[in-house]
Image (spheres, rainbow, N blue to C red):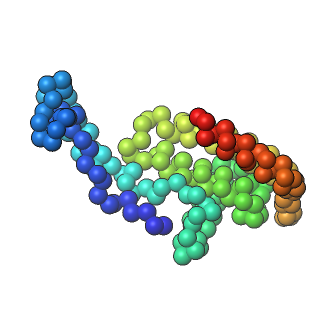
Amino acid sequence: MDCDHNEARPPIPDPQTSSDEEGVESEETPRRSPSIENAYAQLLSELEGADDLNIPPPTFWPDIPLADLRTEWLSLREWVENLVRRYPHLDHHVIPSCWYLHNGHVEALAALRDHERMSFAESSPASSPSQWQWTFAQIEMRLREWTAHAGCLSVHRPTTVQLRPIDNDEWESFLAQDLAARRHL
């Protein structure tokens, strides 16, 4: 991916020295107590070494560069296979053997994988794993519904996309009205 998680972060402004002019402290700025200063410094140092910095960002499947695509596919496949081993109730009614041929399944499973990565990071709050379980349950229901709709229980059935035709004159009229209304906001 093109994202470098180790690049320098912009400095965090110090609210203790906020001013109207450069280098001139405002009289209205409240001073923080030394204990707050210490807690603030400790938090910043913990964030500097947080394992979250080594976790890849969420994956937006349509934007994966071609050079990274094979690696992403292999990574997702390995994660899905491990998920099914960990949760044996995820049978072909939820994740069919042809899941990779259904974009909805791919994007939902990639999102679930990304959620799991962050939920089990060392710096994540203790409640994150249970939040992941709730998300997992929601995605599982969605996958089950999509699999039933696709009909891919023992063999793959291609998904048919049925776009309804749009009346171009009606579309242009709507677009003109929407643009005009937004100009007056």
Q: Position of residue 163 (x, y in %)?
A: 85, 56
Q: Is residue 80 among the parts visible in the rendering? A: yes
Residue at left offset 55%, top offset 70%: 65
Q: Is residue 138 left or right of residue 155?
A: left
**Viewport quadrant of the C terminus:** top right
Q: Is residue 46 above or below residue 160?
A: above
Q: Where, by quadrant of the figure, is residue 17 drawn?
A: top left
Locate residue 100, reporting x and y percent.
71, 64
For this rendering, which residue is in front, 80 or 14? Answer: 14
Above or below 125: residue 30: above
137 sits to left or right of 55: right
x and y percent of residue 117 in the render? 49, 51
Is residue 142 visible in this depiction of the protein?
no
Q: How many marks?
A: 0
In this rendering, position of residue 124 left or right of residue 147: left
- The foreground one among 163 and 72 is 163
Task: Tell me which residue sits at (46%, 58%) in the image.
Answer: 56
